[in-house]
Amino acid sequence: MSATRPPATWLATLHFAKGMAYVVVTVISLLMFSQLGLGVALTVGLVALCHLPWVLKCWWKPRVAAALDWRRWVLLTQLLLAASFVAMAFAFPSVWQLFALLMLTAFLTAIHNVAADALSAHGDDQGHHRLMRELSRKFASVVGQGVLVMMAGNLQVFFRNDVRFSWQLVFFLVAALFLLLFVWHAYRLPSAVASGAGVAAPSAVPATGGVWRLVAYLFFYAFAQGMQAKVSVLFLMTPLRGGGLGLSPQEFGLVMGTLGIIGLTAGGLLGTLAIRRFGWHRCQWPMAAAMLVPGAVYLLLSLRQPGGLHVVCLSVVAEQTAFGFGFAAYLWLLRHIAWREYGKSLMALSLLLSGVCAGALQEAVGYANFFALTFALGALTLLSAGLLRKIPTKK
């Protein structure tokens, strides 16, 4: 195999696979467990635990890197992901078998993500290739939480609310997709690259004395939004009598899986452009303030419970755009610290713990009070941003 395959022939599909597996673990699983009749606390708690592979990445990544080169890891994990999705289809509707397989899928997804990023680092890292990678991941989100969720809903209508059969077909389809991606990448990926090479050098590190404030920033900046993110998915589909908005799977696929992803992408691009134009420190406060918008939007939605789909669409687009804009500051800093791998594990720990707390809290107080509390906890975002306001950085 040639070592000089043009990146354009495999970058997009590689990062589409990366995004698709992550969407199945973090979003589709929420809807699946919810339709199996699990409560909010158990549903959100089980899915939040799937962040564990990313929390432990600092421990297992060196061992993975020593075992095989990144190309073989990409191919192996894609093949095993296809098999795990088939197994999930057959395990339906056994909750604990599904959860065990979901945890396996999460570990495979985490390894695949690391291998895909490392392999991409050896390609031509031009600006349009970076944009291609990002858009490919967002397109995977549209397909995963948009098209596939709408397909599940349509199948349930066609087969008269047969939840089991509809999700089995969805998982068979995802398995077939990953099998096709495996075949394509076996032919198109560049030749083997040593796993220990190709890591870009960090560009900045907090000066002495700022480490613990940086730790607090990485853990608390998006903690309230992490609590809200998974519960808001269930809120959109919970019936009106249960305090939600009562969206069907088809409506959810349109609102969150399509329009929401467009808003998130636009907000992220605007945030990145703003940081490049004005600098991170000047953008930090406006971006931290933007992180409060999703909490305010969901609080209003839970209080008003609007019946018009157009109101829900506009609200979700607004909050996702604001979140994408505000989260750009966090992602920029994460890419520019010396110990970024530990930073990513800390981010995953924040998502895990916030998710585990969120479900039980929502069941205790209801949707409206839950979103009021998470909006108030948005103060952690502002406080954590203030911690880094005066910290200088050194090259």
Image: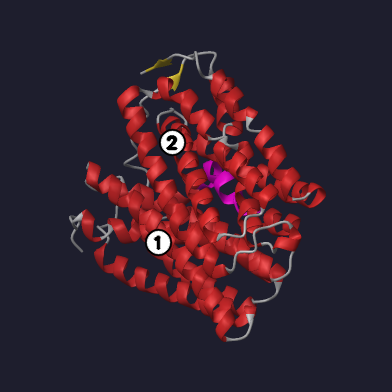
Residue 98 is drawn in which quadrant? bottom right
- Give how far across and how far down residue 389 sits, in percent: 50, 17
Q: Name the residue: 59% across, 68% down.
A: 248
The correct choice, above or below, for 181 with respect to 387 in the image is: below
At label 2, counting other C-alpha atoms closer than 10 Å, the crowd grade (few under 14, some 14-19, many 20 or more) is many
Can see residue 69?
A: no
The correct choice, above or below, for 186 with respect to 199 in the image is: below
- Give how far across and how far down residue 178 sits, in percent: 41, 70
Q: Mark 2 and 1 residues: CB-CB less than 8 Å, in contact?
A: no
Residue 96 is drawn in which quadrant? bottom right
Q: Which residue is mark 2?
A: 328
Instruction: Based on the picture, tell me whether residue 56 belongs to the magenta stretch.
Output: yes
Instruction: Based on the picture, tell me whether residue 52 belongs to the magenta stretch.
Output: yes
Q: As rendered, which of 236 and 90 lies closer to the eye?
A: 236
Q: Which residue is mark 1?
A: 17
Which of pointers 2 and 1 lies earlier in the amino acid sequence?
1
Q: As rendered, which of 342 and 376 lies closer to the eye?
A: 376
The region drawn magenta spans: 49-60
Position of residue 363 in the picture relative to residue 264 (left or right): right
SS assignment at label 2: helix
Q: As rendered, which of 166 and 70 lies closer to the eye?
A: 166
